[in-house]
Image (cartoon, helix red, strand yellow):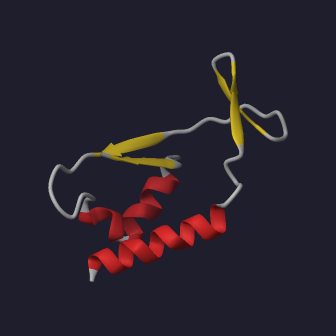
Amino acid sequence: MKLLVVSAIYLFLIVTCHGSADVHTANKYIIDRANRVRFYHGVNFIRKEFPWYPSELLDPSYVTNLAQWGLNVVRLG
């Protein structure tokens, strides 16, 4: 069931965010289509066993807190 939920979230993000991260690098910066420098602030979530993602990421209030703290990237590993 969790795999189905994560898959649905992933599909939703692909559909809604397609093209929103159209960026390239110039020197040491990441630049978007409008020539703005993009800044990414994130956190690493490492889990080396199935289901490969931490259960906290399925909690909407936890994810809302991450966004309110200024984080806009999650790296799964």
Residue 72 place in picture, x, y as percent: 53, 49
Q: Nearer the viewer, residue 66 or 76?
A: 76
Q: Residue at x 65, y 68 (%)?
A: 16
Left or right of 18 in this view: 64: left
Q: Nearer the viewer, residue 36 or 5?
A: 5
Q: Residue at x 62, y 70 (%)?
A: 15
Residue at the bottom extreme of this rendering: 1
Q: Nearer the viewer, residue 62 or 38?
A: 38
Residue at the left extreme of this rendering: 49
Q: Residue at x 37, y 78 (%)?
A: 5
In the depicted structure, whether residue 42 falls above or below residue 25: below
Residue 39 place in picture, x, y as percent: 62, 35
Q: Residue 25 sits in which quadrant?
A: top right
Residue 53 place in picture, x, y as percent: 27, 59
Left or right of 46 in this view: 41: right
Residue at the right extreme of this rendering: 34
Q: Residue 12 sits in which quadrant?
A: bottom right
Q: Residue at x 51, y 71 (%)?
A: 11
In the depicted structure, whether residue 34 falls above or below residue 21: above
